[in-house]
Structure formats: C-alpha cells, structure tokens
Image: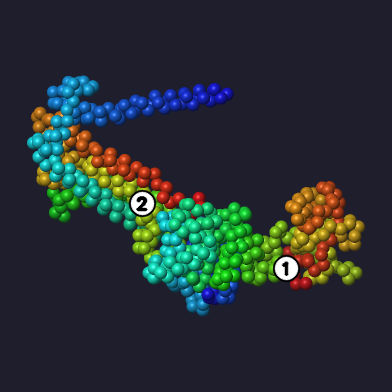
Amino acid sequence: MATVSFQNVEKSFGTTKVLHGISFDIKDGEFVVLVGPSGCGKSTLLRMLAGLEEITGGTIGIDGKVVNDVESKDRDIAMVFQSYALYPHMTVADNMAFSLKLRKADAKVTQERVAHASKILNLDPYLKRYPRELSGGQRQRVAMGRAIVRDPKVFLFDEPLSNLDAKLRVAMRAEIKALHQRLKTTTVYVTHDQVEAMTMADRIVVMHDGRIEQIGEPLALYDHPANLFVAQFIGSPAMNVVNGVIKRSDGTACVDVGDGVQWPLHQSPGAEGQSVAYGVRPGDLALTSETAPGAVVGEVVVIEPTGAETELLIQAGQAQLILVTHGRPAVNPGDRVGLAVAPGKVHVFDQASGNRIAA
Amino acid sequence: MRKGALLHTATAEAKLLLIGIPVVIWTLLPIYHIFLFSISTKDEAFAGKLWPDHPTLRNFGIVFNQDNYFLNHFWRQLGNSMVIAVATGLVTLCVATTAAFAISRLRSRGGRTVMNLALFTYFIPAAFLAVPMYKAMAAYGLLNHQSSLVLAMVTIASPYAIWVLKQSSDKLPYELDEAARMDGASPLQLFRLVYLPLMAPALVAVGTYALLLAWNEYLYAFLLLSNDLDITLAVALGHFLSADDSPWEILMTTGLIYALPPAAIYYAFKRYMVGGLTAGAVKS
C-alpha cells in the first residue's frame, strides 16, 4: 500500500506535448479512476507511473520517493493491460508465478501466493490451462491474478474491461471493486467509460487534452461539474445544454435562448446579459402541463421506453433535449408538453470559458 | 442458378488442374529419373525404358560400402555435409535471433538501417562474392577449414533470416514485453523466457532454411574446401563428372540419398512452419 503523487508532470512525444503539468495526489488505499476521451493522455500518464514511458517534466512519487529514474521493475507496481498480455506459452499458474520466479522467490512461498490469488479469483480449475484455452473474462482474471500475486504497492489498470462484452464488463466491474475492497491496495484505473469511472472510483480525475478538468468524488462531479466538459462527459445520457443570455425582470431570472424560449433560473448566478450555457440533466427535467408557470414548451419527437425508465427526445425551440422519467408517461410523438426543471438542479456555465458560474 | 454455380466451380477447378498436372509432372519427372537410375544397372540405365527389366538395389550397396573410386569417403563426406549444415543453421539462428530481438523488441537505434544494409547485399549475386570471400578466408587463414564454409553460408543466410525473424517478432504483442518488464524481467530474461519460446516456430523455419542452404551449397564448398576428407558430399558428387566414363547410376543413387535428409527435415518440421503458438496471448 502506498501513496502516489504527481507533481507538474509533463510529457512530450517529439515536439507534440501531450501532458501539460499534471498535479494531484492519491491517498493510501484509494481507488482513483483516470477518465477522459481518447487521446486525453490518461493512458500515457498511467504508463509513466508504470515506468513504461519516460517522464519529460515534473516528478512522480510513490510513497514519497521520486521514481522518475527508477526502473519499472523496481517500482513495486503491477499492471493489468487492456489486452491482458498473458504469456501464451505458460500455464495460468506459471503466468501468475512468473514475477516471483524472476525474483527467485522461495518455491513454497510462490506456490502459496499463487494458490491464494487463484482462490480469490476463482481460478483454481484453470491453473493448468494455457491462456488460449480460456475465455476473455477468465484471461482478464488471470491478468489480475498475476498482479495480485506480487502484492504490489500500487495496482494499475489500463482499460482492462474494454475487450469484454457488455454483460461480462458489468460483472468484472463489480469483481474489481470487490477485490479492491478486500485488498485495499492503492489503485489507479484508466478508462474512457464514464460509467465505469462513476461506479468504481473513490475519486475520479477527468482529463481532456492533456490537462485535468476536475478531480473529485463521483457524485460531487455529477452534482457540481466544474466546467462544461465535465458536465457533458459525466452522466449518461449526457447533460442537456442550451446556449442563451441571462435576463432578469421583476426579481426573477431566466436564460433566454431565443425563439421565445426562456429557461428558469432558480438561483440567479451570472450577470444580466451574460452569454451562458444552461445545463440540466435528463433526470432533472419533468413533464408538466404546457400552461404551468415557468414551464418550457416543447414537442415530443421520439419515445424510448427501456422498461424501468422512459427516455423522451423533445424539441424545444432550436434545441433537442433528452428527458428521463421513471414512469411511463402517456404521451405520443408530436404531442406538445411542458418541461419543468427541478429547483437547484440547474447548471450554468460561462459560454466563453466553459467554467461553472457559482450559484 | 445453382447448377450454373456448380458448373462455374467445376470449370475453375478444371482450369487449375490443367495448370497443376503439367507442373506436377514437370517437378516429379527428374526425381523419377534419378530414382530409375538408382535401381538400374549401368546398361539398363541408358536403355530408355520407363521401368528397368531387372530392378536392383546393388547401387545402394556400392554407395553404402564405399565400393567406388569416387565414393571412397562417402560416409565421411556425408558427415561433413551434416556438420556444416547443422553448424550453419545454429550459427545463423544465433546471429539472426539476437539481431531480430534487438531490432524489433529492444528497438535499438539504427537497427532497421543495419537490417536494410544487410538485405542490400542480396543485390549482388552470391557467385560474384565468391572470389572476394575466397580472398577474405585466405587472409584469415581459414581456407580448407570447414569453419570457412560455415562462416560463408552464415553470411549468405543471415540477412534473410534476420528479416524473416524481425517480421515475425514484430507480430508478437509489445505488451508482452511490457508485462515482462513490469514483472521484473531483464532484457536477457525477456529474451530467454518470453521471446525465444514464442518465436520457436519461426526459429525452426529459419534454422531449417539456413541448414538446407548449406546442405545444398556447391560453389562455395567447392572453392573453400579442397581436401577429399573435408569436402561435402555435394562437391564429391561433382567429382564424378571429372571422369571420361562417369558411373551415372552410382552418381544418381548418391544424389537420391543426399536428397533424403532435407525431405525428412522438412517433413518433420512442417507443423512449425504453420505456427499458431501465439494464440491466446492477446485478444485478436
């Protein structure tokens, strides 16, 4: 178990700078997820921590010790690769024992550790098999077993679930989380899937274009996104965002998006006339009557029932919005409806900077 | 519709057979010819028959008992051929495997350039290089040493061997190296414990290639070795033609025997040529 700290970490490939001064700390035993779209630098950052990429600038520390010039094998970290990277010519047991064998560990200790890991991961029936004889999920577990056997200071996961089918992914997600709760090893997990990030992380680091957009607990990020990027990246379906101008009259405020559509501002952040992006999550929109006070009028375009929830695509002025409701609303495509915004659930961002305007 | 498709397939197959059958006959005819000579007496060999009236294994007896002037050192020379071929195969493997590992896995600076320069030597026919090679070996005092032939054959086989091994080692997922590095493997351990086992099929293929190249070599063997006790069987076969009245049936019998080990080696290692050992390493 260990702490990890990134201090102003930079990375360039040739003249292209891909990481611009990343700084944050990971607490002992914490499960941190680096999330962001492809090319945001999250995998590069992980690989730098792993010692597989050179560090161009800044320092990376493990347990307070700078590891910039420490070889990968001496950092005491274990990594689970996206492609599993199992040694195809070794059995499951040999795959897991490989690192201990290289360290010339005692045969008995090795056997005990492999047995322990295989028990945790339910790999006992497969120990004598070769990777080619395993399913994707089993291979993934072997890759995790290989990491567990080493009992490292830090676990690294590089998109470990993206090669699995949807159902298996959900199962493995829970398995990894349970594993962390059991072993309590500091974990850094990279994914582009915000659902994985939300469900697994103690803290999420949202990255974009080589910079950190926001760091925080999953629900904090969901409830108080620091900027438009985080707002739209975290949450599924994504947050509805419309652009408009703040208007105030008679003590009430709203965002005028043109075409006579005005979205209510319950708190009144921002200045009169400021160009803002008005965001509201699909679950924070509710159907109401067209004539209700403050309701925004729209027309139902598509209805997507998913059983427990119903997703409605609604055209309001120029914008198309998604509304998620738990019921099964009695509406049909083409119906005109009123939209109500739950009080306190509005997110307002400055259009120019994209930053949240404090309520 | 279905009938038409069937007819189409049949026509396509017929066309392929029309090409295939003559090619097979063309290939097998010389081999049959050799075989025919080896089971005929000298008189019958030239009788122009498709099958001798009195097939005999006498020729094989003569060869195995070294019962002919040209075959006084048959077993010795066959042994020479084997030693030289195996040595060439092994040395080529050592050179090519380490080079391919450095170029493809360790990504050494300038590795590709070195490989391309080596491949460039193939623009010059080996026959042109024979005289310079002879002079070089003379300078090192290696003439009439079997090691000179081994070195020459390794020189000729290596560029291709490096290229083939580099290609197939490029196909190994790089994450395996990274995983091994994180598991604590040094480059040499990576080479020995991960790289070599996974490259086994390619190694067998390349080793066989170098071995057969040396086994079949005539020109360099003829130039670099001259002592009857040192030469390979291929050169010894050439000596048959120095007589006015060559014993063709014995020559052909020896040739047939000489052709058997390569066939056996190829057959034995056939399955390695296909590969498939890397299945399961990564999701494909």
Cα distance between the residues tagged 1 and 2: 56 Å
Q: Which residue is mark 1?
A: A223
Residue kind at label 1, given as amino acid type: Asp
Between residues A221 and A1, which one lies in front from this camera angle? A1
Q: Is residue A55 visible?
A: no
In the rendering, at what x and y percent does residue A1 appear?
A: 53, 75
Between residues A137 and A198, which one lies in front from this camera angle? A137
The residue sitting at 78% across, 70% down in the picture is: A270
Residue kind at label 2, given as amino acid type: Ala
Quick check: A99 above or below A338?
below
Element at badge 1?
helix
In the rendering, at what x and y percent does residue B261 appear?
A: 24, 41
Q: Is residue B262 left or right of residue A318?
A: left
In the rendering, at what x and y percent does residue A34 appear?
A: 59, 66
Quick check: A51 above or below B271?
below
Crowding around mark 1 (Cα neighbors within 10 Å: few <14, some 14 to 19, many 20+) is some
Q: Are marks 1 and 2 on the same chain?
A: no
Q: Which residue is mark 2?
A: B200
Q: Is residue B4 left or right of residue A309?
A: left
The residue sitting at 17% across, 45% down in the picture is: B79
